[in-house]
Structures are given as structure tokens and as C-alpha cells.
Amino acid sequence: MTTRFSAAGIEMQLRRYPETADANLQAWDAADEHLLQHFCEAGELPKGPVMLLNDSFGALCCSLKQRWPETELLFCSDARTGHLGAQANLTLNDLAPGNTGFHASRELASLPVPGLVLAKLPKNLNFLADQLRQLSGLLPAGTLVLIGAKAKSINKALLENIGSHLGPAQASLAWKKTRIITVVADGKPRPPLSINRWSVPEYDLTLSNLSNVFAASKLDIGARLMLEHMPTDNFRSVIDLGCGNGVLGLRAAQLYPEAQVHFVDESEMAVASAEANWTDNGFKDKGHFHWDDCLSHLDESISADLILCNPPFHQGEAITDHIAWQMFNDAKRRLKPGGLLQVVGNRHLGYHIKLKRLFGNCKTVASNGKFVILQAWC
Ligand SMILES: C[S@@+](CC[C@H](N)C(=O)[O-])C[C@H]1O[C@@H](n2cnc3c(N)ncnc32)[C@H](O)[C@@H]1O
């Protein structure tokens, strides 16, 4: 894996978070380099803080801190790995965070008014719309927002869409298959997007998802299979690992009414959605909500006799199984003796091999054409 970053005269080491040995994965992409070149050409920073949106592992944050150490930065990301990655890369490059504030994406509208916004285009365009509408109430007319993206992701409809949420947008020429979208805020506040609410009548659950949460308006097919094959026992402590809107943990709360249920996700919006869904479905105490990278910062006192996991098979744009592997390792450390990890996964991902290697056992409890439900015990 390349860790040597070089763009716009800035040289640094940058690592992904968590670190991975996968040679194909690096901590930045050509859109980061393009954004820095495009923006460093101007030479000077405008007055006021610089807001950074969706900076994957801190390439933008560290570059600005190296070039302009005194500048106030507002680092805003929904991803815990983004926050942890940026902080680790600042340390790796001996850069003092100084006046850098780290914020969740839901806080945009309440932050100090920035003089400039640098952003990476998120994959989820509903999340983009949410961010732009939050900015529309914050940015004075004329404030520039520069968005770096793959050229193939940019088209007329996207520019019009951005225009409707924040202000007129145009795209630069392509460089290394990326373009920079320049948006000029028009100073007209838009109301927030309405929250998506939907029901799962077969389990008597109502769900709502904030804009960056997996499975926006219907059950994931893997989650559906998991719900049909929940284990039966008198579980007392359950972890929904990678909880999304919390559907697996909510079902656990219905089936095991004595259980403390811990919901964990690296998306802050997912954790907030799971918490809202917990309350909206009438559950009271016994629900616990953690914004974390897998189970790495969970209090040492928390252990479980059941962990439910529908792992991601990508991190940002990169297809990878290293998050699933980390989830399985963390699960093994948190399970009580005799505790059970139940996983749903795409058949072709070969999770059974990983679980067998880690736990020394693995049983297939259900499958359909595409997915398998696997169990491993401590
Ligand atoms: C396939 S979705 C499953 C969501 C939900 N449990 C379901 O079954 O519908 C995977 C979830 O893992 C979360 N995730 C990804 N990387 C993570 C990490 N490093 N730590 C914790 N959660 C993570 C994602 O945000 C996403 O919500």
C-alpha cells in the first residue's frame, strides 16, 4: 500500500484507518490531489475557518494544516473512521491539530460560518442533498464550495441538483479522471430534508433512516434472512454490530426482553437513527448506543452472549473484507465464554473460512441463493 502522499507541493505519509495490508487501498484518491491543486492555485485562503466535508482519512485536513498551520479547520464527517483516520494522520505527520474542530455531519448548520468549504462527493446523493441544505442556511451568498469527485460521477443532472440545494454549480476540466465542482452559495436557506419513515409490518416495527444510513426505505435482503433465523435462547446482553437503523437489535429486544442491547455503528447518523427507532418502537431502558469503529473503543466492561452482524463489504468506494474481518475479531474478544456470533453474508464472500479460522468452528444455519447465515461460538 502506498502511504507517500504528494500533491500541490505538499508531501506527507497518509494511512487508512484502520490500517490495512491490502496493497490496493490507499488513504486518498486523485480527487483529493485535484482539489488541493485547484485550490492551492489561488495561493491565499479566504477569511474565516475552512470547512472540510467527507475527508476520508484526513488527506485534506493534514494538507491544510501543513500549508497553513494557523487556519481554523472544521472537520465534518459522518464516519468515525474518518475522524480517527484524520487524527492518526495528523499525529503521524507531527502536525498539531491546534484549532481544528471535529464534528459529526449532522452538526453542520450550527457550526461557525466558514470562509470556504472543501468537500469530497459522497456516494449517497441523498446525504449530499442533506449536507448542502444544511449549508444553505449557514453560508452567506457568494461563499465557495469546492467538491472533488470522479469525472464519471458528474453530469448535468447532478449539477442542477446541487444548484437546487445550495446555488449555481459548474464543473472544471478533467484531471486524472476527476473534476472539481465549484458551487457558489446563493444565501437562500432551504428546509431540511424530510426523514424517511417506513414500516416492517411482519415484525411490527417502524423505522426511520437519517440521510446517510444503509437500507433507506426497505429491508436489506441479508437483514431479512437474518430476521427469519434469529437464534433462540435466553440472551442477556446483545450487540448489534454495524447496526444501521438498528433493525436487528430491535428484533433482538422483542425476542429477548431481558437483554441489554448495544447498537454500534461507525456512521453517526446510523447510531442516531437506531436510537430514534428504539424510542419510536416503544423500547425504554436497556438500549445503549455507540458511535465506534467496530468495537474498538467500547467500554471494557461490555461483553455479550450474542452478537448479530451484517457486515459491510466496502469502505467508502473500496470493496474490501477487512472491516468484516475486524468485526469478527472484535466480536470474539467481546463474547462471553459460550457466546454466539451470528453473521449474514453474501455466499461468495467466504466468511465461513474466516470464522472457522478465528473461532475454530462455524455452522451454516440457513441459506438462500445469495446469502448464508453463519454461527460461530466462543
Ligand atoms: C450491511 S450494513 C448493515 C446494517 C443493518 N445492521 C442491517 O442489517 O440492515 C453494514 C453497517 O456497518 C456499518 N459499518 C461500516 N464500517 C463500520 C465500522 N468500521 N465499524 C462499525 N460499523 C461499521 C455501516 O455504516 C452499515 O450501517
Image (cartoon, rainbow, N blue to C red):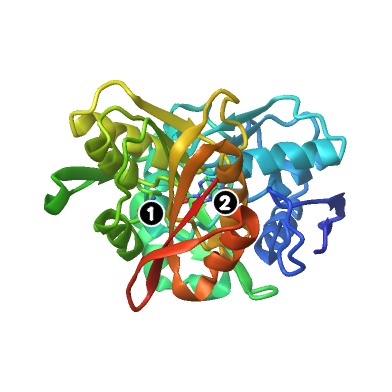
- Taking the spot 50% from the left edge, 57% from the top edge, the residue there is 122
Residue at numbered disc 2: 328
Question: Does any atom of ligand 1 lie closer than 8 Å to the CB of label 1?
Answer: yes
The tag on residue 214 is 1
Answer above or below: position of 27 versus 372.
Answer: above
* Quarter of the picture holding the C terminus: top right
The amino acid type, in three-letter code, at marker 2 is Phe
- In the image, is 298 to the left or to the right of 10? left
The tag on residue 111 is none
Dot 1 or dot 2: first in sequence order is 1
Q: Do residues under tags 1 and 2 come within 8 Å of each other at their CB atoms? A: no
Question: Where residue 92 sits: x, y (%)?
Answer: 84, 41
Question: Where residue 16 sits: x, y (%)?
Answer: 71, 52
Answer above or below: position of 247 versus 22.
Answer: above
Question: Where residue 294 sits: x, y (%)?
Answer: 56, 43
The amino acid type, in three-letter code, at marker 1 is Phe
Question: Where residue 103 sits: x, y (%)?
Answer: 55, 32
Q: Secondary structure at mark 2?
A: helix
